[in-house]
Image (tube, grey):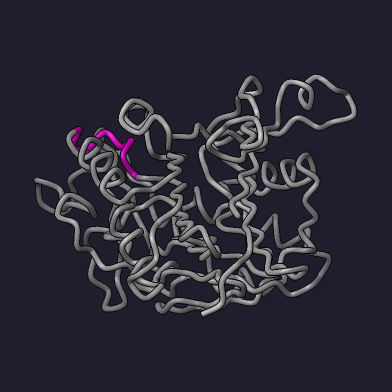
Amino acid sequence: MFTADRVQITVVMENQIDMLLPDLDPDAGALHCVTRNGLVEHFDPKHTIPVAENGISLLVEAWRGKRSSRVLFDVGITGSAMAHNLAALRIDPATIDHIVISHGHPDHYGGIHGVLELTENRRTPVATHPDAFLPRYAVMPDGRTSPFYNRDFTADSLDVRGGAPVLTREPLDLGWGLRTTGEIPREVDFEGPRPPAEPIGAPGLYQVDDDGAFGLDEVWDEQGLVIDVAGEGLVVLTGCAHAGVINTCRRAVDLAGGDRRVRAVMGGFHLGFPTTPQENVAKTVDAFSEMGADMVMPMHCSGLRAHAAMQAGLPEAYVQPAVGSVITIG
């Protein structure tokens, strides 16, 4: 199986910006290689200041020698914010080889139409799970309902804007050690969607399946992204980790043949939701520790409790995220 010599991951969209975060330089004794969009970039009028929103998008560049694959993993929640940040971070959308949408929730696919319109009429492959297009509903605790909130995310809507839909439940090889996870088995007992305590109609996320049944949205369409870096191990990216971040890491290891270690994990860990049991945070920290991951970056939906617990429990591995951060491994 091919591997990458190195991988560079740029945080295009994330829930937070912090211009005071310092660069991390291994040559200066740091454990990680991270450059930041910092105070100079924010204060210098030659630069455009990026924005944050409740979504996630990561540009992944996997290199082998002088050749690379460029994959955009998720596209935030709005096209306008994505267009702004791509320009602010000097990323040319026309150079993106492939787009991967982790699952069919708006904070992950919402910016796709705006991004496709920037690719200069070049048809860009857009990979996602076929179930990502199934109708979804959200029922709030106060009785409000968001009906079919993903109705603007369809194969036709991608096609008409220059996207080339690639719908698969299986892993997809994207070059130089880059691949999607495909569907993620739910093996860890504390991870994955839990049915509401009350009957259908109780607050929660719902979906209409292929057979027309209305039930719990178990987000079986969620997929992660994995990069196998020579001499380092696996870099695992999660969109929202509805399937569980530990389940996603296990899936990554299995795809790599079972003998590759997880070097780094970053993305949404799905630990910040009000309905997520508090003990799940501690269990996740313990699992990361047992896994021996050198770098852990909780983002987007991970929640303040997870950040605090991982900074305390995994002090050498924890890295705080922010829009414009660039992580290099290898």
Residue 300 visible from this viewpoint: no
For the point 35% across and 33% down, the residue is 314
- The x and y percentages for residue 282 are 22, 35
Residue 303 visible from this viewpoint: yes
Q: Is residue 217 left or right of residue 58?
A: left
Q: Is residue 23 left or right of residue 259?
A: right
Above/below status of 306 relative to 72: above
Q: What residue occupies the far right of the structure in this picture?
A: 46
- The x and y percentages for residue 85 are 72, 41
The foreground one among 113 and 256 is 256
Q: Is residue 272 magenta?
A: yes
Above/below status of 267 relative to 49: below
Q: Is residue 154 left or right of residue 248?
A: right
The foreground one among 19 and 235 is 235
- The x and y percentages for residue 189 are 14, 54
The foreground one among 20 and 26 is 26
Q: Is residue 177 magenta?
A: no
Q: Which residues are magenta?
A: 270-278
Magenta part, dominant SS:
loop
The foreground one among 3 and 192 is 3
- The x and y percentages for residue 259 are 35, 69
For the point 46% across and 47% down, the residue is 267
For the point 55% across and 65% down, the residue is 230
